[in-house]
Every structure is written in C-alpha cells, then in structure tokens.
Image (cartoon, rainbow, N blue to C red):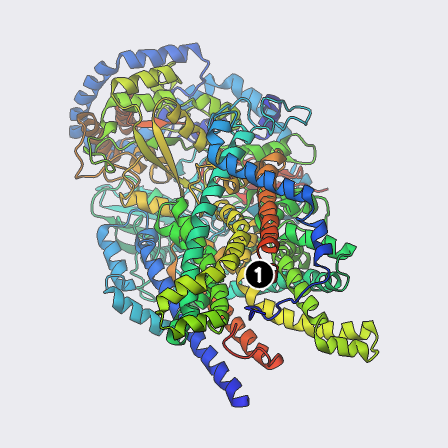
C-alpha cells in the first residue's frame, strides 16, 4: 500500500458501495450532475448568445418585477428584473462567465505552481523543503481576503486581482499534497531503480514521479473549483473583486442587498446559482475521486 | 408608488419653507427675488425668467459699468454695508412673503398636523438612532470629513454662529455675534456671557482664543496637535483677547468668509482647561463641548451614548439652529449595512434608521407602524468634466471634452427625470446649474434646455467624431443617497448614446483626497453645494467649492490650457469670491453660471433626498440644511 | 524522546518566527504601495507645503529600507504609532476590537464543533444510516453555501421574525447567535467530514477490534475512543480552521455589523490608515501562527505516532 499523505488514510471500506449508492453512483444523480455541469460551462462560454436580453439594458419603469410564478410576474422576465429593470435571467447567464473564467484561470495556475513547489520540496527535502514549507505557512497565516483588500487599494479592481488572490490562497494546498506524496514515492522501487541507473533529478521527477501524482492533483483541483466559485463571489460581494459595473453572481447579490425585503429574488437567485454550481462540482469531484482512485478518498479540500 | 410619496409629504419639510424662513431671517435673501423661487408654476415668474435670458448681453454690459463704479465706491459701501443688507433683505422678505402666501397657508396646515403639543413629548425618553457611519474620534476638530458627524458632532458641540433654516449663517442666535473692523483688518467675535461647557467651564474670550490656537498648532500645551480644521482656519492672523467676552482675529487680507470659517458648523467649541488638564487623547475619547447633549460613553464603531445638557444656552423654541434637546438620552448605534439598519428598526432595536435609500424607504412608507422622513438636500449632484486639459490623460490624444458638442451630448444623454421618478422618491429637483434647487438663477427654469434627447446626443457625438469615446467616471461612494442605484443608470444612459463609460466606485474619503490633489484627471461626480464655505452668500459656495482654479474639488489647475470661455468664467468667480457686497457678488455668480451653462462645463443631475425611517412616536420638524441631514437633537419622542 | 520533541518544538518556533517576518514584510510593502496616507489625512485645502511637512513628520520621505528597518524595530517594541484615522495609538484601536473578534471566532468554532463532531461520530458509527446520509448531504450544502448569503438569509428569515434575536450589532448576549451560526456553518461541514473519516479509520484499527474482542460494550468502546478521537480532531482542526474563521469573520462582521477586527481592517484599508492595518494584520497573522504552533506541538505530544516532518 502506498504511503499516505494524511494520517487518517482509510483502508478498504466495506461499506463503500453502500455509501456510493446514495451518491454520485446513482445514475440519476450522475446524469443530473453532468448535465448541470455541462449547462454551466455552456452558459459560461456562450452566455452572450443565449441570454434572452441585453443584461445591461435599462428599463427604469419596469424595475423590480418579480419572477414569473409570482402574481405580478410575467414570462417576459422569467426571473424578474433588478433595481434598474435589467433582466435577472440574462444577468445570471452572463454572470456564469466570470465564475467560469475565474475557475479556468485560477485552478491551472494554482495547480501548476503548487505542484512544482510541492515536488521540489518533497524530492530535495532539506532547505528547499524548509523554505517552501515556510511559504506554505505564510499563506496559511495571511487570509486571502486581506491580500484582496490590499490589492484593491493598490490597483483598479479587475479579474486579475481576483486571480492573484485566489492563486495565492490555493497553491499551498497543492504543494502540501504533492510534497507528501512525493515523499512516499521517493521510497518506491521504480523511483529507486531510476536513481540507481543514474537518471538525473529532473528526469525522474518528470518521467516517474509526476505521472503517479496526476490522479491526486486532478482530484484536488476539482475539489477546489467550488472554493473558487464561492470565493470569487465573496470578494465581489465585499467590493474587492471584479469591477462593480460588471456582472458576477457575487456582485448581483451585493447589489440585491439593498432591496432584499422588497425583491427577494435578486439575492436569492444568484445565491442558489452559486450553491448549485458548488454542489455539482463537489459531487463531480467526489465521483472523480472514486472513479480515478478509491485510495484517495480522504483528500481534504 | 405615487400614493406613497404623496402621503409622505406630511412629514416632508418643504424646500420652500426653508427658503421662506431664510428670507424672513433677512440674510441671504438677496438672491431670492432674483432666483424667482416664488414658484415654478407662476406665469409671471417664467416670463421674467425668459426676459432675463434675452437681456443677458445688455445685463453684462451694465454689469461691467457697474463694476467700475463699484470699485470706486467700495470703501464707502463697506461702511454702509451692513445697514444696506438689512434693508434689502427686509424688502425681499416681504416680496417673498406675498408671493408665497397661498403656499404658506397650505404648508402651515400640513405642518400643524405634525407639530406635537409639548405636553405630549416624552422628556424622559431615550431615542436610539441606527447610523450607517460612525466617527473615528469624538474630537470635532480632528474627526474631519470621516463621516458620522450625526452621531457625535451634532450632539456634543455647538459653534459660535448659528444657521437659519436656509443654511445661512446668522450673527444672532448663536453663542456669539460678529463684526468686521471698519478697516477690514480684523474680524471680531463678541461672545454671549454666561455660557458654560458640559463640565461647567465658562465659555469666554480666552477659551475661544485657545480653541483657534489649538487648531492652528499654536497652543503651548501641544504645538504638534493636528487638526483637520487647520487649513480652514489658515486665514487667521494673531488672535487676541480684547476683553472677557471679545476676541479679535487679525486678517492679512479682508476675508469675506470669516464668519463661516471661524464660527460655522465645523467649528464646534471646546473647553480650554479640560483639554490642557487631560490631554488630546483623553479628549478624543471623552469629549466635552457646549452642545445640546453631553457625552456619556462610547464604544468605538458600536455605540455612543449622550445625555441632554440641562444647562444648554438655548430653549427648545429658539429661532435658529441651536435648540435644547427633547429626549433625555440619545444613543447612537452603528449598522454599516443599510438592510441591517432597516431590520434593526423593524425589530424595535432603534427608533430612527439613519440615511436609507428610496427602496428601503418604500418598505416602511406603506405601513402604519413606521413612517419615513424626507429632508431635501441643498446640494446638487453633477458630473464634472475636465475641459481645460488639452490632452486626454489616458490616450494622450486631443481631449474630447474640449469640444462643446461632446459635453452637450453628455447633457442630452441623461434622463434625469426618469431617474428621479423611478429610482429616487420622485420629488427631487432636476438640476440645470450647479446651484442647489431654489437658489437657481433663472436659467434653471428654462424649458427644454439639455432635456433628455438621446437622438440629439448621439447626433452631436457623431458630428464631433467621438462615437465610442471611452472614459471613466469616479464616484465617491458611501455618503450620497442611493449612489449605487442611480450611478449605473447614468452610466448606461451615456453608453446608450455612444459613450463607453466605466465607473470607479471609490471610497468616499479616498476619492475626495485624490480629487483634491488633482489626481483624478477623468470626469468625477460631486455634489456642488457644500454651503459650508459660502456664507454669507447663498449660492457662493457652489463655485467656491467646485469648478474653478483654487477651489479644492476641481479639475482646473493654474497650469491648464484654459478654454477662453473658462477664463471668462474663472475671472467672474474670482471677483465674486472677494466681493463683500452680497447683491453684487450674486450678480457676478449669476453671470458665471450662465457661461457655465451655455458651455456645458458640467452635467448637472439632480438634488438627492435625505431619507430616514422612524417609529410613529418620533416627530421631526427642523432642518438647517447642513449636509449631515437629520439632527437627533430636534427629534421628539411622544409619550405612549 | 523528550529532547527530540523539544528540538521539534524549537524548529517549529523558528519557522513560526520566519513566517511572522514574512507577513510583516508583505504588510509593509503592500501598504506602502497602497497610496499616500498624508494626502488623505491632510485637511481639505492643505497646501503642498503643509503636506510636505506632514510627510516629513511621519518619516515618509526617508528611503524605503530605512522606513522598513524602523518599522521592524517598532514592531519589536509593539509600537505601531498613532492611528491616522482615530488619532490614538493604533495598538489601542486594535485592542478594543480584539475581544469582539475573539468572541465571534470562538463562538463560530464552537458552532462548527458542536455541529460537526457529534454528527461526524454518529455518521461514522452508523455508516449508511439516516444520520450519515443526512449529515453528508448537509455537509455538501454547508460547503456550497456562501456565508455572506447565509447571513443575509438569516437576517431576512430569522431575525425579523424572532424578536429576541437582534439583527446585528453587539448589544446584547443574543447578538452573537446569528453571526456565530453564519461563521460556523462552513467549517462545520469540514469538521464533520474530518471527524467522520478519522472515526471510520479508528474503528478499523486493531486495538478497537481487540477491545471489542475483549467483550467491552460497544458503548464503552465508542466513548473511550470516540472521545479521544474527537479531541484529536478538535486540535487538528483548530489549527486548520483558525485562518478560515478569521477571514470568514471579515465578511460576517460586515454583514452583521459586528464591531471586530475584520470590520476594522476593512475600514482602515480603505482609509489608508497604515498603523492600524499593520497592527491588526500582524496581530491576526501572529495569532494564526501561534495557534498552529501550539497545535503542532501538542499534536506531537498527544499522538506520538505522528511526530515529525511528515505532515
């Protein structure tokens, strides 16, 4: 059995199948998960073509219309309108793009940076490891949100600020996982064999260690997607994320706050969107973990 | 919606009543006849207005002659000044009185319903106010513009001069009476005898002298003291005690604004001995003033408790700004989130939810168990355009704002009326000039000028070859009502005619300091009527605060490449700012305003309301036009 | 054994100091990059000369490295200077807020542990049972719901209908209920998952089998080992969650008007009040580092199997 990174590594779980039954292994859940995920990606990419209306179009007279199922609502604006009469559904669809963009930019960056540093720390040990682990500690000691507010004070708000902040917040998770796994792999026969035939460090790391890590890294990356979605919304909500006049689910919630009592849907709808996406992504992550490598059930997000 | 806001009128103080009161008081009324505030629906007025416009050129010529004459007459005039002013004011007050008789009756009827019998007011009550901003320090001379004046400064401190309800500074009704020396070399305060601070320390010439010297960093106990008022008091030369109740302040050059910049709302008086004995840090946490309420306790960003000052120098029914408090205790609580503030009111945790948006007001207006108080603001929101920079700071190419067609396009693009009707309460005044509604020169009543016309806007922009002109608007956020609601609408309206606008929603204090340092080269939104430095003239403040070289919140700098029209404008404003004769200064401001308007130097938008939701037990009937809005001192809580 | 533990503890301490130094540097350079504090502080119509004088007085014209050195020395003496905004010592301003945030953080952690640990234990013992399914679905949701959104919903649906629960502020003891629930919900999910898997792991250990084989009642086995396990979980999670709790607190304090450090940090950064920013960020970080140090060290004492390096 592979040496585990976490102290609480589970051995064969006799109830695994039973547990999976209620979860993603149920075909219905699985189909639902995949279709929602697909829908999210499609909306994120083709939102501007799909949205029924221009999400910026003002309609001051028709502001704060409720969703269609309420007495005063209509199907012209199925999810109602906001405080400037803009179509909530269209804005929701547009908002998916920012979430998707954040995911697409943050996750690969954090994964690559974290994994490289993690391998280096695990492989070389000693001072390399110490310095890198001190950086990990540094990240733990500085909540990302503080960095976000600092950046907001220095630069204009932009998506790149959000990306920097979230990469800073997430890389350490990868570094720790990868370092732990590398430590284990170092002692494995095939790595020792590669060493004895005189392969250099870089070659071993790339050709032998990395391929064995891919599964865990991919799983961890998936499990962090929801974190990115929620964190982006949180930063935008606080006003330290993307510019206030662009559309993101966090900004929609923040803008809806002022009319939460009279127009409940403005806060509720984007909130539900965030929850659904995070939920689905997490379910997908769990499924992926079970699918790729049941051994890694305990990767913490 | 309309119904709601008509119901509101009962608790709304009419702008007209404020102006009327100011006219009665006789100061600042000089502008009123000219302004024609007698009523927008008055036909005679409108004709007069139209005439004024036609006769502009003639007027201007006449003005120039007048200028020369007046230069010669100035010294004689200065002596006769005060007398003259009083006469003028009295005449105008009468005029206004006549013009407004009908409206006055109506108004009296409606306010009568709101005015409580003194016997019904609970003098032992505690009023709890939920504020959206809290002061960082309780020393009025260091708190600066950090927000939260309502929670401390208004209660604990009082200044030498008082305002009337038109927000015009008064020589009577305050703690002192002022006078310029005959040769205009010094400015003199006569302090009312028998006034004490909350700790019993007397207010006298010595404490006033110490007060100014502390602000200026000249007081011996702590020369390093840093006050946010220092620059305001920068005009003061030597400060000397003439007798126990008289202080004289030397002036290098005659300073028109001396009363406001030594006795205005920012200059809340402090006790000398208490500060010397306890030090500045202690004072910032345990303030003593001579205001209507005395400080009890403070938990920063949480709660401020105050108690009625029983030895306050003025009674409940004093005619001007300073009046004794009604409730025995006033407690301020801090709720930065607007909805939390509203919810606290709903849950009975506070009696007054301070500064709410029109949408939140609508939550309450319909109900029997709450009501909404709306106070007008004497200020006007406007988009300030950088017209004097030859190059666009971002592209480095020629500055499109120098083309009057682009500026006019921006004016035509914005449907201010739709914003007022749908996003605000529907009762705000559409602004046509940088003067607050009611102080408008007659151009404000011209129909059709720069009214919403998106097609014309687009045509103008196209003609100028500027379709797609991209720029950023800086908006200081956090203090102005519904800022995040109307600003996106303005932005989108500009985009709809072919501009490409981004909005920078900036922190209020930071944005102010950037604008002040000329570090905001792009258009910014500002409210152009901080009356604070405008006394003794009503409209004066507008230009003093904003558009010209030398005013703190302006794009214009000495080094700029001025448009010829702007140079003309600048010259008129400078002349008016140094003019002791009110009537004449007003005329000059008027001319300047016409130039500004014709050249579309800015995009005037609208006045904003101050809105408050309260329980039915709270009555509120006073307003002195200060930018802080509702002052808890005047709030009455009825017995239940 | 002892000395090895001592050495480990000493190593951890050194590392912690290095981390604190890193935080200090980041804070210093980021806040100097954030803008000129004097222009903000100066009176509305201060002249250029007055601004220059003020800069001189605050030492803002000195070379950066000199300012940095002075900054380090000041921190060693716990001297953060006067708050620009409140014109009082920054340490005082921060100190006033500390209690509120510690209260909220502790309450949030308590909520997280009170929900997470019992559910985690029950879920592990009755795998696949109703509680397991319920609590795992709950955990999925707990990790999907943004806390600022939850806070708004709680104000909307709870505070407005239950009189004795205030909507915000810190006026009565009940004030803490909603902020604590909001803050604790996200960590609660993590705590539950962690406890559950730790518990599952333990239940399969040899010594449990032995205990069972010895005929100890199921209840006794569970109590003895479950308790021990939860304690381990508490300690481990304390270290992992303290950072989450503090950053969560910044948002929650904003939503519920809780006058704590988080709110202060936000206010001070927008007002470029460096002394306060520096003092509070530094304090937050030292706090996190310290708790993690304690956790690491105590962990090695409690469970000697996991001693060095590997984690």
Q: Which residue is depicted at the point 23% across and 56% down?
A: C52
| Residue closer to the observer: A30 or C83 | A30
**Quarter of the figure with the N terminus of chain C:** bottom right
The vertical placement of B437 against A236, above or below, is above
Image coordinates for residue C2, horizontal then vertical, percent: 55, 89
Image coordinates for residue A71, horizontal then vertical, percent: 69, 24
| Residue closer to the observer: A43 or B345 | A43
Residue B460 found in image quarter: top left
Q: Count all numbered tags in the image, as a single digit.
A: 1
Give left or right: position of A246 versus B73: right
Residue B230 seen from this side: yes
Q: Which residue is depicted at the point 51% across and 34% down?
A: A43
The vertical placement of B80 against B497, above or below, is below
| Residue closer to the observer: B84 or B121 | B121
Give left or right: position of C282 versus C123: left
Tell me which chain the residue with mark 1 is part of.
A
Q: Residues within 10 Å of mark 1 (few under 14, many from 20)?
A: some
The vertical placement of B389 against C311, above or below, is above
| Residue closer to the observer: C222 or C289 | C222
Residue B140 seen from this side: no
Image coordinates for residue B556, horizontal then vertical, percent: 24, 36
**Which element carries disc 1, helix, strand or loop?**
loop
Image coordinates for residue A177, horizontal then vertical, percent: 50, 64
Residue on which disc 1 sits: A300
């Amino acid at each position: 059995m592979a040496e585990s990174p976490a102290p609480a590594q589970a051995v064969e779980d006799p109830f695994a199948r039973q547990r999976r039954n209620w979860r993603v292994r149920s075909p219905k859940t699985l189909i639902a998960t995949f279709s929602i995920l697909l829908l999210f990606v499609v909306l994120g990419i083709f939102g501007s073509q799909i949205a029924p209306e221009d999400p910026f179009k003002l309609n001051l007279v028709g502001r704060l219309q409720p969703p269609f199922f309420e007495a005063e609502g209509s199907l012209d604006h199925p999810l109602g309108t906001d405080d400037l009469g803009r179509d909530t559904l269209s804005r929701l669809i547009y908002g998916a793009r920012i979430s998707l963009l954040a995911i697409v930019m943050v996750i690969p960056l954090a994964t690559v940076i974290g994994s490289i540093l993690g391998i280096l720390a695990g492989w070389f040990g000693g001072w390399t490891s110490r310095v890198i682990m001190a950086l990990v500690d540094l990240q733990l000691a500085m909540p990302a949100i503080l960095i976000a507010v600092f950046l907001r004070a220095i630069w204009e708000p932009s998506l790149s600020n959000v990306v920097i902040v979230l990469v800073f917040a997430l890389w350490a998770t990868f570094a720790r996982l990868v370092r732990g796994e590398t430590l284990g792999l170092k002692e494995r026969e095939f790595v020792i064999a590669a060493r004895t035939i005189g392969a250099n460090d870089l070659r071993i790391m790339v050709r032998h260690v990395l391929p064995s890590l891919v599964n865990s890294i991919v799983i961890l990356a998936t499990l962090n997607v929801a974190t990115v979605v929620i964190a982006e919304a949180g930063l935008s909500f606080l006003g330290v994320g993307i510019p206030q006049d662009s559309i993101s689910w966090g900004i929609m919630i923040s803008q809806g706050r002022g009319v939460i009592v009279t127009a409940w849907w403005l806060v509720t709808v984007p909130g539900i969107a965030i929850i659904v996406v995070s939920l689905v992504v997490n379910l997908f992550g769990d499924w992926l973990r079970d699918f790729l490598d049941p051994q890694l059930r305990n990767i913490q997000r | 919606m309309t119904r709601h806001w008509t119901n509101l009128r009962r608790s709304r103080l009419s702008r007209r009543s404020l102006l009327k009161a100011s006219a009665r008081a006789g100061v600042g009324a000089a502008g009123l006849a000219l302004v024609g505030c007698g009523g927008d629906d008055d036909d005679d007025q409108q004709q007069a207005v139209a005439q004024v416009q036609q006769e502009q050129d003639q007027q201007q010529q006449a003005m120039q002659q007048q200028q020369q004459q007046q230069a010669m007459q100035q010294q004689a005039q200065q002596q006769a000044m005060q007398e003259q002013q009083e006469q003028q004011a009295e005449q105008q007050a009468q005029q206004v009185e006549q013009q407004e008789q009908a409206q006055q009756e109506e108004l009296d009827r409606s306010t009568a319903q709101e005015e409580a019998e003194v016997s019904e007011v609970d003098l032992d009550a505690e009023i709890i106010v939920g504020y959206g901003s809290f002061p960082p320090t309780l020393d009025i001379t260091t708190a600066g513009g950090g927000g939260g004046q309502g929670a401390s400064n208004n209660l604990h401190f009082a200044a030498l001069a008082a305002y009337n309800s038109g927000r015009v500074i008064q020589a009577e009704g305050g703690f002192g009476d002022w006078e310029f020396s005959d040769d205009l070399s010094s400015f003199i305060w006569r302090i009312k005898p028998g006034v004490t601070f909350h700790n019993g320390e007397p207010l006298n010439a010595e404490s006033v002298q110490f007060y100014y010297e502390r602000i200026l960093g000249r007081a011996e106990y702590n020369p390093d003291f840093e006050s946010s008022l220092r620059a305001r008091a920068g005009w003061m030369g030597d400060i000397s005690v003439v007798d126990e109740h008289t202080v004289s302040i030397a002036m290098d050059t005659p300073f028109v604004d001396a009363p406001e910049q030594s006795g205005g709302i920012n200059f809340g008086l402090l006790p000398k001995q208490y500060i010397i004995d306890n030090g500045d840090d202690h004072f910032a946490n345990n303030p003593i003033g001579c205001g209507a309420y005395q400080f009890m306790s403070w938990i920063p960003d949480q709660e401020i408790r105050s108690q009625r000052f029983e030895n306050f120098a003025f009674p409940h029914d004093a005619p001007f700004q300073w009046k004794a408090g009604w409730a025995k205790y006033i407690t301020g609580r801090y709720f930065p989130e607007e909805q939390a503030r509203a919810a606290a009111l709903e849950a009975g945790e506070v009696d007054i939810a301070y500064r709410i948006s029109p949408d939140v007001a609508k939550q309450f207006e319909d109900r029997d168990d709450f009501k909404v108080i709306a106070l007008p603001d004497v200020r006007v929101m406007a988009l300030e355009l950088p017209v004097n920079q030859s190059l666009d700071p971002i592209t480095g190419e020629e500055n499109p704002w120098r083309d009057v067609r682009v500026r006019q396009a921006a004016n035509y693009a914005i449907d201010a009326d739709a914003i007022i009707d749908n996003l605000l309460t529907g009762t705000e005044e559409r602004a046509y000039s940088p003067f607050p509604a009611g102080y408008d020169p007659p151009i404000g009543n011209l129909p059709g000028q720069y009214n919403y016309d998106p097609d014309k806007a687009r045509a103008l922009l196209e003609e100028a070859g500027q379709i797609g002109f991209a720029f950023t608007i800086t908006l200081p956020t956090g203090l102005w009502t519904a800022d995040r609601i109307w600003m996106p609408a303005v932005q989108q309206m500009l985009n709809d005619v072919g501009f490409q606008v981004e909005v920078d929603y900036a922190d209020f204090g930071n944005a102010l300091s950037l604008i002040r340092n000329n570090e905001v080269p792009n258009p910014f939104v500002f409210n152009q009527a901080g009356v604070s430095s405008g006394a003794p003239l009503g409209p004066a403040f507008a230009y003093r605060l904003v558009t010209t070289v030398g005013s703190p919140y302006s794009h214009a700098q000495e080094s700029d490449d001025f448009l010829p029209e702007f140079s003309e404008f600048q010259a008129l404003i400078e002349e008016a700012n140094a003019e002791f004769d009110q009537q004449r200064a007003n005329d000059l401001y008027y001319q300047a305003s016409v130039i500004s308007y014709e050249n579309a130097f800015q995009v005037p938008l609208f006045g904003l309301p101050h809105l408050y939701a309260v329980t039915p037990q709270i009555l509120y009937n006073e307003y002195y036009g200060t930018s802080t809005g509702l002052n808890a001192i005047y709030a009455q809580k009825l017995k239940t | 054994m002892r000395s090895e533990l001592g050495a480990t503890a000493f190593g951890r301490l050194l590392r912690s100091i290095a981390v604190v130094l890193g935080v200090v540097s980041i804070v210093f350079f980021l806040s100097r990059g954030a803008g000129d504090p004097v222009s903000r502080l100066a009176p509305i119509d201060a002249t250029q000369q007055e601004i220059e004088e003020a800069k001189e007085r605050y030492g803002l014209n000195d070379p950066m490295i000199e300012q940095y050195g002075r900054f380090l020395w000041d921190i060693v003496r716990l001297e953060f200077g006067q708050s620009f905004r409140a014109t009082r010592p920054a340490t005082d301003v921060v100190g006033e807020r500390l209690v509120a945030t510690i209260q909220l953080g502790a309450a949030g952690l308590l909520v997280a542990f009170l929900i997470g640990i019992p559910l985690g234990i029950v879920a592990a013992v009755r795998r696949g049972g109703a509680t397991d399914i319920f609590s795992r679905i709950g955990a999925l949701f707990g990790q999907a719901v943004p806390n600022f959104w939850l806070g708004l919903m709680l104000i909307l649906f709870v505070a407005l209908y239950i009189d004795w629960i205030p909507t915000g502020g810190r006026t009565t003891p009940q004030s803490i209920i909603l902020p604590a629930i909001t803050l604790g919900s996200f960590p609660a999910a993590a705590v539950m998952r962690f406890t559950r898997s730790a518990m599952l792991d333990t239940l399969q250990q040899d010594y449990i089998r032995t205990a069972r084989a010895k005929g100890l009642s199921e209840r006794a086995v569970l109590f003895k080992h479950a308790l021990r396990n939860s304690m381990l979980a508490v300690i481990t999670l304390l270290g992992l969650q303290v950072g989450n709790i503090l950053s969560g607190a910044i948002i929650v304090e904003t939503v519920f008007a809780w006058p704590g450090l988080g709110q202060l940090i936000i206010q001070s950064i927008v007002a470029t009040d460096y002394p306060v920013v520096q003092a509070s960020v530094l304090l937050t970080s030292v706090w996190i580092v310290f708790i993690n140090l304690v956790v690491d060290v105590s962990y090695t004492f409690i469970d000697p199997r996991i001693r060095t390096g590997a984690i």
